Image (cartoon, grey):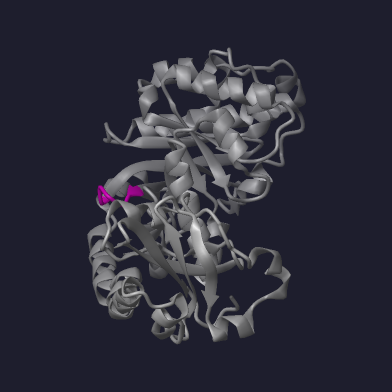
Amino acid sequence: MSHSLTEILPAPELDLLSPMLTQQGDSWTADFRGLKLRTALQPIYSISHKRTVGYEALIRAFDNDNAAVLPMHLFELPDTDAENLLLDRLCRYLHIRNYSGIKDQLNWLFLNVSPRVVTSGSQSDSFFGALLKKTGLPPHRIVMEIVEQPTDDAERLKDTVAYYRKLGCLTAIDDFGAGHSNFERIWNLSPDIVKLDRTLLTRATEDQRARQILNGMVSLLHQSGCLVLLEGVETRDQAMIAIDAGVDFVQGFYFRRPCLELEELPHTPADLEELLQEYKKRKQITQDPTQQLVNYFNGPFRRAIERLQDGSLMSQACFELLNHPAVSRCYLADDKGIQIEDTLVSDSAIEKRDPRFRPLENTTSADWFRQQYLRQALAQPENLHVTTPYLCVTGAYMCVTLSLAYEHKGRLQVLCCDILANPHQTP
């Protein structure tokens, strides 16, 4: 590609790009700087639908000897912003040409767009709309992926995303959770889909805490109005983590590698049915651990309440509970959520207490009404409730809380008991 061409091509249009494409049978290739460019597609699957719902288009480059050239080396070739714009548009033109030839009138095509192009190009430029019109591919079947990274012009990025949305395309944030990504970008751009970076999955595979963070992030993104795609799924265990995290879509080598033979793709579905059956079996075998806690502590908890109703002191009533090695503390709250008396801390918890969090230990007259376990207990008296693991504010350790509301002298009171989520941790 000569410099003279890129200098006169600040915004390459279809009539200038078309000669760079060549049709070979049912597929298309493109030429750039002596390299042959081809489209590879990688399926994206919906876990709930148990089928393919889209494909990510990836560029593959080959030299004159048909040796593969790494994509990163391809995108290092442009010398100017104009040539970078040309390459970006050439790739999208090639992908849409190829995808339009696939007998699939339903699924999405995910297209990457260079952040440099997004921030330097003009969103009012008619190229992409003209491309869709020329190829006949409906805009609602396109998902434009914006790589998550800092940009010099956040407003232009926002305008460009709005432009694609106005065309009728969906938008996605790519690689969320890596580098400089944050929720401010989600709030500003309001993408339809968020693709979580593979590093989040790698960490979740190795660390239980990272798995909890992944699950929480998926929940927050759903509450933000975004569908969630987890990429980089390479093993069966990672597929199970993705299912458990509640993501909507998955993508990765475990299901299917990017494929240059595009006509083969519709005939290679992933066996999500088998994965879901295994997930259900695992859940049945392990059972919900919170429900196991309810079953285990139901007797001691109700005996403690009977003693309290008979007039026993808190220390006497909760003696059995506090002697259990997993129990860290017991406390009472009134029907307004205000704590009654001091917290009772087990001997084992006192020994392991972290002095750095001493300012949080005294909970006299603390107000626990904001806590779901307190409100839930008041709403359903006589039922023993249990939370999922959370970070306890009185010592910054992970715990679950059992709570039960009972009547005492004509008013409701709630007995609460914190149990270490990991009995070997320091409360």
Q: Which of these two is toward me, 409 or 246?
A: 409
Q: Indicate the quadrant where residue 104 lies.
A: top left
Name the spot of residue 149 as percent of width and height, x first.
Answer: 66, 40
**What secondary structure predominates along the stretch shown in magenta?**
loop
Q: Which of these two is toward me, 181 or 39?
A: 181
Residue lying at 34% horizontally and 49% vertically, measured from the top left: 45
Q: Is residue 326 above or below residue 254?
A: below
Indicate whether residue 279 is drawn in magenta. Answer: no
Q: Which of these two is toward me, 319 or 256?
A: 319
Q: Is residue 52 left or right of residue 121?
A: left
Q: Is residue 80 visible?
A: yes
Q: Is residue 163 left or right of residue 121?
A: left
Q: Quadrant of the N terminus?
A: top right
Magenta highlight range: 45-50
Q: Is residue 26 left or right of residue 6?
A: left
Name the spot of residue 347 as percent of width and height, x first.
Answer: 56, 86
Q: Is residue 208 above or below residue 233?
A: below
Q: Which of these two is toward me, 99 or 55?
A: 55
Q: Indicate the quadrant where residue 275 lies.
A: bottom left
Q: Is residue 403 above or below residue 103?
A: below
Residue lying at 40% horizontally and 69% vertically, measured from the top left: 237
Q: Is residue 25 visible?
A: no
Q: Is residue 8 left or right of residue 306?
A: right
